[in-house]
Image (cartoon, rainbow, N blue to C red):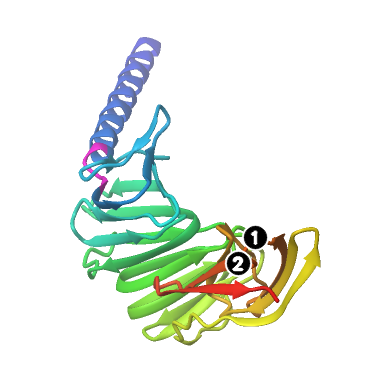
């Protein structure tokens, strides 16, 4: 009786080990088959993985957890998801990283991307498989889609703007979820739930409230933009509050002109040159 028990136990253990090995091999194969491919490169675009950092070229593939693409000033790239279901337009001064690329047992495609800074715009065809999902993660929250065209902007603080041009986007943070439907926008401040969606403005206006010479080649600048927008002043991204307001002390160039750019989550950009009196 004891011998029979140990025989059955041994067979069960062998079965478990074989099953786990087969599952691991299958998962590995699934990961290899998923990727983001670089389709175009303008300017300084860098591909990084755990082993190397190198200039990205057309055809470069992001395949593994942690693989990333970053763009420099006046640079951009377009990425295509392996299935052709989505295209990602990556703007200047942006970093995008692979968080998850998987295929489910029901042939669903699970794609999770992490954007830690900058701006991206996505065009996603409808995901017909109920197991499929595509998510953009930022330090502030998660934005999920099943077929739409939308954009995301991420400030250095993690504050995230979301704007939907077509379809519907679902944004979640701090246990709360809001739907950002076609023609609406919202933003998330880290540690807070998403703001109530409002009508899409795609507005790059800059209201300058203070522009003053502080002496010692320094200038004080205070202004306001749409809360979802990115602001870059003298090549440095700024942090805006929930009303889109900012105030900084910056170096005053010899020509007394300071470059500022405002970019919406959908990628619309306006450049300004502020002349300090």
Q: Which mark is residue 179?
A: none
Residue 69 shown in magenta: no
Secondary structure state at the residue bearing disc 2: strand
Q: Quadrant of residue 143?
A: bottom left
**Region in magenta:** 32-37
Q: Earlier in the sequence, mark 1 or mark 2?
A: 1
Query: Residue at (63%, 63%) from the top-left corner?
Result: 190
Q: Which mark is residue 258?
A: 2
Up the image or down, 19 lies above or below 115; here it is: above
Furthest toward the bottom, the residue is 199
Q: In what quadrant of the picture does the C terminus appear? A: bottom right
Up the image or down, 94 lies above or below 161; here it is: above
Asked if the residues shown at circle 1 and circle 2 are in contact, with their CB atoms under 8 angstroms apart, the answer is yes
Which of 52/194 is in front? 52
Q: Quadrant of residue 81?
A: bottom left
Residue 17: give x, y in percent of width and height. 33, 23
Q: In what quadrant of the picture does the N terminus appear? A: top left
Q: Nearer the viewer, mark 1 or mark 2?
A: 1
Furthest toward the front, the residue is 255
Residue 264: give x, y in percent of width and height. 46, 74
Q: Which residue is mark 1?
A: 253
Which of 140/158 is in front? 158
Query: Residue at (29%, 37%) from the top-left corner?
Result: 27
Which of 121/2 is in front? 121
Secondary structure state at the residue bearing disc 1: loop
Q: Residues within 10 Å of mark 2 (few under 14, many from 20)?
A: some
Furthest toward the right, the residue is 215
Query: Residue at (63%, 59%) from the top-left corner?
Result: 157
* C-alpha span from label 1 to label 2: 7 Å
Left or right: residue 205 compared with residue 243? left
């Amino acid at each position: 009786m004891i011998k029979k028990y140990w025989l059955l136990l041994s067979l069960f253990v062998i079965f478990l080990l074989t099953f786990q090995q087969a599952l691991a091999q299958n998962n590995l194969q699934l990961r290899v088959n998923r990727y983001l491919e670089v389709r175009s490169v303008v300017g300084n675009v860098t591909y990084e993985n755990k082993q190397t950092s190198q200039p990205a070229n057309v055809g470069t593939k992001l395949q593994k957890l942690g693989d990333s693409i970053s763009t420099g000033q006046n640079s951009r790239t377009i990425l295509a998801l392996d299935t052709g279901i989505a295209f990602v337009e990556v703007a200047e001064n942006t970093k995008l990283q692979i968080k998850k690329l998987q295929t489910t047992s029901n042939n669903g495609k699970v794609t999770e991307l992490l954007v830690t800074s900058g701006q991206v715009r996505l065009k996603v065809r409808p995901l017909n498989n109920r197991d499929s999902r595509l998510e953009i993660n930022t330090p502030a929250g998660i934005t999920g889609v099943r077929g739409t065209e939308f954009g995301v902007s991420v400030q250095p603080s993690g504050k995230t703007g979301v704007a939907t041009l077509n379809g519907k986007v679902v944004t979640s943070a701090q246990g709360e979820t809001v739907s950002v439907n076609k023609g609406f926008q919202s933003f998330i401040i880290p540690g807070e739930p998403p703001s109530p969606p409002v009508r899409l403005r795609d507005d790059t206006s800059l209201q300058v409230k203070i522009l003053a010479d502080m002496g010692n080649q320094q200038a004080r600048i205070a202004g306001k933009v749409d809360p979802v927008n990115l602001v870059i002043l003298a090549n440095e991204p700024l942090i805006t509050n929930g009303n889109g307001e900012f105030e900084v002390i910056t170096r005053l160039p010899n020509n007394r002109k300071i470059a500022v750019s405002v970019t919406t989550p959908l990628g619309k950009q306006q450049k300004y040159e502020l002349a300090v009196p």
